[in-house]
């Protein structure tokens, strides 16, 4: 694999580079986050190994910038920050895996191999579609028949959940958990009211796409003829 290692500690960088080269990988080094961002955005890579604590631009900011540019290259964070919150922050920033220093090279090699076996993400993973409705998860935009639709954050999340389960029935309980992070029924019409507003925005002059499945939930799909 073609691997970019973004690591400011010279000894660690050489250790990783040497070991990966012995395994047959083509390794390039970057010593700070700014150079790492440039290298990662200007060239094609199979994998990025990124230290969290980098000069000029920290690892989290670097990876967030890459994801904002719709660059899906897998990222393995390498860091001394091993707390749960640190791991969550790394994954939420767009990382695919997280390895805490100090680590055994055998574990690094295994994680590199595992990430190399994953299917490469493409732009299709960031675009959700049903009929003439399209959601861009990176640009955070929604269009129907080429016309932009302005959604509030909660409406956007609600539509995203429906689109990720297009053609399936999404229950009220699922929506409460995924959109409102509620693991109980608040006994309000919060789902119904948001769904009504979302439908009103999506269906202007067009066939309805969100269908109520009586006694079950909702489904987004083309109207059946």
Image (spheres, rainbow, N blue to C red):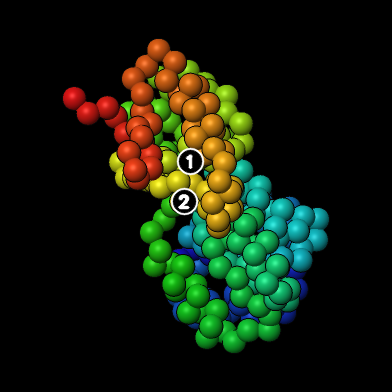
Q: Nearer the viewer, residue 34 or 130?
A: 130
**Which of the two labelled residues, at mark 1 and mark 2, occupies the earlier sequence position?**
1
Q: Nearer the viewer, residue 165 or 212?
A: 212
Q: Is residue 36 left or right of residue 193?
A: right
On the image, numbered disc 1 is attached to which residue?
Answer: 160
The C terminus: image quadrant: top left
Q: Is residue 116 left or right of residue 185?
A: left
Q: Residue at x 40, y 12 (%)?
A: 205
Asked if disc 1 and disc 2 are in contact, CB closer than 8 Å, the reply is no
Q: Which mark is residue 173?
A: 2
Residue 142 x/y as whole percent: 50, 29
Q: Residue at x 46, y 26 (%)?
A: 199
Helix, strand or loop at mark 2: helix
Mark 1 burial class by Cα count in 10 Å: few <14, some 14-19, many 20+:
many
Which residue is the extreme one toward the front? 187
Task: From this view, report whether residue 24 is shown above or below residue 73.
Answer: below
- Asked if one can make out residue 88 in the rendered structure from this viewpoint, the answer is yes
The N terminus: image quadrant: bottom left
Q: Is residue 24 left or right of residue 57?
A: left
Q: Quadrant of residue 114?
A: bottom left
């Amino acid at each position: 694999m073609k691997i970019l290692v973004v690591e400011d500690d010279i000894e660690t960088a050489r250790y990783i580079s040497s070991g990966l080269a012995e395994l047959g990988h083509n390794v390039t080094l970057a010593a700070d986050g700014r150079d790492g961002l440039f290298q990662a955005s200007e060239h094609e890579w199979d994998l990025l190994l990124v230290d969290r604590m980098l000069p000029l631009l920290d690892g989290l900011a670097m990876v967030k910038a890459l994801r904002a540019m719709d660059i899906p290259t897998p990222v393995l964070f390498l860091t001394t920050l091993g707390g749960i919150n640190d791991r969550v922050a790394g994954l939420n920033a767009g990382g695919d895996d997280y390895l805490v220093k100090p680590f055994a090279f055998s574990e690094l090699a295994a994680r590199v191999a595992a990430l190399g076996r994953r299917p490469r993400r493409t732009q299709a993973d960031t675009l959700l579609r049903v009929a003439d409705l399209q959601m861009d998860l990176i640009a955070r935009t929604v269009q129907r028949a080429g016309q932009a639709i302005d959604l509030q954050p909660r409406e956007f999340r609600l539509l995203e959940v429906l689109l990720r389960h297009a053609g399936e029935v999404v229950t009220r309980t699922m929506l409460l958990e995924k959109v409102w992070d509620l693991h109980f029924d608040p006994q309000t019409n919060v789902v119904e009211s948001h769904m009504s507003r979302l439908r009103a925005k999506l269906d202007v002059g067009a066939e309805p796409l969100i269908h109520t499945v009586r006694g079950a939930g909702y489904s987004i799909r083309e109207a059946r003829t």
